[in-house]
Structures are given as structure tokens and as C-alpha cells.
Amino acid sequence: MKSRWVVTLFLLALAAPLSAQPRVHVEKLADGVWAGAPDKGANVGWFVLGDGVIAVDAGADAATGEAILKAIAESTGGKPVRAVVITHAHGDHAGGARAFAAAGARIICQESIAGQLLALVLQSKGGADDPLTAKPNAKPVVEAISERSIMVDGIHDAQVFFLGAAHSKGDMVVYLVNDKILFIGDLAANGRMPFMQSPDVDPDGWERALAALSHVPVDKMVPGHGQIGPTSGLLESAAYVHAVNQLAHKFVAAGMNDELVGIQVHAPENQIKGLETSEEHVLNVKAAVRVEREKVAKKAATPAPTPATPAKK
């Protein structure tokens, strides 16, 4: 009996590390195109381009990044990952970039966050499980895009573009033209409220970005959060951001302080149809109010241009 317990405990000890490994729930969206929902962090995606793979976002940490790389290898027959596009610098999207760098992938991001992302990639966690520890001579490089980049192989032609600061200052989206698949990061969510509380959020810019994307034909969408596939989150997120901006403009014009904003959000005339006024919504409105106040103050502090004096004849 004792020996049976010893064997059982030994087997449990072997199984524990395996069960602790992050998992990625993979969905095939089209031939050569996949998306994944890791146990930890935001949704990710990848597609075959030429003889390699381009990934979109890297997971929340190095372990998740390695799990994503494993899922990529299994789904593509072991094709090398040439690059990973980071939609923005938040940890749930970019935290696994170090694992991708260790695998030899280029790290691509918007130029405003290139330094921030490089610092993240170079930050060693130490220990044997750090993906770059075994590669002391590796020199990761971050490749920055200003506004737009196009990758073409005639099959999965991809456009990577920046529509201005929105959810954060460095949001980028990836659009597969032939497949009409959009990897949208956190600009839109399916079945979830957009998060508008980033320190570098630009609510008006966010509204403009989603208005621009409304003209793009999209059959499937991979949002940073929420269900993979449906495109309904594009219109829903745009409507929500617009409604929050309208409230922010109204409250700032009325000179309300944060306490009064928190009260007025619950007033019947300020309710958003079909939306429960949750604490998360209140925080989103307060964040939009903060940004609007800053814009109004900056505009007031900017001296008016001096009118030109007519030349004397």
C-alpha cells in the first residue's frame, strides 16, 4: 500500500509542471490564418507569409509567448516565425515579445512606442526559464512603423497601419486584404466594454480610428478581448466610444468636477441605451473627462496668433 502511494505522489509531481504550462485555444480562420486565445493575456493571431509566419501580439509573458510559438509551429508545420506585430505596448499584448525575440522574430511596433518595447524585450527575468538566457549573444531589434507597412506574397497580402493615438498612443491594426480578416488589438472588443482608462488614451482619436475602419470590408475580426470571429464589436465599440465622448464633452463644458461626474453618469438623461452603468463605465467616462479637460486647458493656454500688420505704402 505504501509503495502505491509513493508511485501516485511521484506521478502527480510529474504532472504538476505540465498542468501549469499556459495553453492557447486555437481557431483556424482561413487557409494559412489562425487566431488564439491564451489562458493569460489578450487574443493573438498569425498567418503564413511566403516561407514564414507573421504573428500578431505575443501574450502576457514569456511562458505564454513560448506557448503561442508552440501553437504556431503545430498549426503551420513548423514554419519559422519571421516577425511579430505588437498592436500596442500594454503587457497583456506585448509581455511575451522576449520569447519571440529569442526565436529570431523581428519585433514590429508603432514608432512612438519603439523605445518602450525595446526596453521590455531587453528586460531579463533571470533564471533558466528566461527565453534569452540560453542565447547570450542575441541582440533583439525593434522595427518601428510610422503610419503604414505592406507585406505582399500574393496570398495573404497584409497591411499594417496606424490610425493615430486611440486606446493608447501606439495602436496598430493588421488587415489581411484577400481574406478580409482584421486583427484590431484593443480598438474594438466583442461582447466586452472597451477599456478607456489607459494613461495615453485619446478618446476622440479612438472615435476617428473606428470611423475610418468602418469603411474597411471585414468578414472576420480578431479583437484583443472577447470572441474571435464576429465583427459586431466594431460598431458596438464605435457607438460606445462615441457615447462616452459625448458625455465627456458635456461634463467638461459644464465645469463638473470628478465627484459630480460620478453622480451625473447615473442620471437618466446620461444613460447609454442598453448599457448598465457599471463602475467600469464610470471610470471610462472619468478618463475621457480627464483627457477633454487637458485639451481644453491646453487650447486656452495657447496664445492666439498675432495678426499680420499690413505693410505701409
Image (spheres, rainbow, N blue to C red):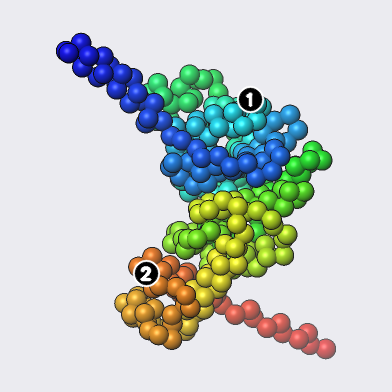
Q: Please tell me whether mark 2 sits on a helix, a strand or a loop.
A: loop
Which residue is at the front of the view, 236 or 196? 236
Query: Is 58 left, or right, of 20 in this rendering?
Result: right
Q: Quadrant of the N terminus?
A: top left
Residue indicated by mark 2: 278
Residue type at the position of mark 1: Gly
Residue at 48% over, 41% down: 38
The residue positioned farthest toward the bottom in the image shown = 313
Between residue 304 and residue 312, name the one nearer to us. Answer: 304
Quadrant holding the C terminus: bottom right
As displayed, is residue 137 above or below residue 211? Answer: above
Of labels 2 and 1, earlier in sequence is: 1
Is disc 1 placed on a helix, strand or loop? loop
The outermost residue toward the left is 2
Tell me residue 175's x, y (percent).
Answer: 69, 50
Image height of 269 relative to 99, above or below: below
Asked if residue 276 can be seen in this view, the reply is: yes
Mark 2 surroundings: few (<14), some (14-19) or many (≥20) residues within 10 A? few
Up-down relation of residue 159 to residue 140 (above or below): below
Residue 78 numbered mark, or none: 1
